[in-house]
Amino acid sequence: MTEKHDDQNVQEEQKEQQEVSLYEKLANRTAEILEEGRKTTDEALKKAKEELASAGEFSREQADKVGNYVRRDLMENARMAKDAVVKSVDPQRLAAGAQSAFSRILTSAAEALSEVAAKAEKNLEFHTGEVTSPGTLTCKDCGKELHMTSTTRIPPCPKCHKTLFRKSY
Ligand SMILES: [Zn+2]
């Protein structure tokens, strides 16, 4: 291997590490903004991207690119959280206790989540080279499962070397 190739590999590794770091910063900041309330997921993500790009640590292009990964994972989470909320609420119990804070929270959470989830496609595709949050990726071609415990860049399938996955948590 020539020195030039070594330099390229080092640069590539630095870029990958930077995107993983940016992903985690963006996801955390977006969650904080959402917890403050009065913002939709898209508004919160946009604000988080602007803050990080303004700080100068990352370019706007990087923030946009990694922001798309964060958005996709948020959508996928919202879709699954909504399924969980809908399954856990007994409609009769909800009607009987319609004034209780508990049911109001569940109802508003379900509404807020369904707004997000309605925009999310089912069974989103995940590709090699993208950054994503912890979870299980399953190769669409051979079914090999990759268990990821931290934010990571998606590798090629270790078994069949294909690049398309679906994700579960
Ligand atoms: Zn495979």
Image (cartoon, rainbow, N blue to C red):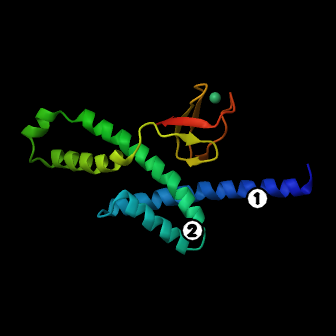
Mark 2 secondary-structure assignment: helix
- Badge 2: few (under 14), some or many (20 or more) residues near its Cα, within 10 Å? some
| Mark 2 C-beta to ligand 1 under 8 Å | no
Q: Position of residue 80 (x, y in %)?
A: 37, 39
Q: Which circle marks residue 118 in the picture?
A: none
* Residue at screen point 79% across, 53% down: 9
Of 134 and 19, nearer the camera is: 19
* Residue at screen point 74% across, 55% down: 12
Residue type at mark 1 is Gln
Question: Would you name the residue on which mark 2 appears?
Answer: 60
Of 115 and 39, nearer the camera is: 115
Question: Would you name the residue on which mark 1 appears?
Answer: 11
Could you say which quadrant of the image residue 110 lies in?
Answer: top left
Residue type at mark 2 is Arg
| Mark 1 C-beta to ligand 1 under 8 Å | no
Mark 1 secondary-structure assignment: helix
In the picture, measured across the screen, residue 70 lies left or right of residue 89, that is right
Quadrant position of ligand 1: top right
Q: Position of residue 65 (x, y in %)?
A: 56, 58
Outermost top residue = 142
- Residue 104, compared with residue 37, is above or below; it is above
Marks 2 and 1, how far apart at CA: 19 Å
Q: Position of residue 138 (x, y in %)?
A: 55, 31
Q: Earlier in the sequence, mark 2 or mark 1?
A: 1
Could you say which quadrant of the image residue 20 lies in?
Answer: bottom right
In the picture, measured across the screen, residue 113 lies left or right of residue 30, that is left
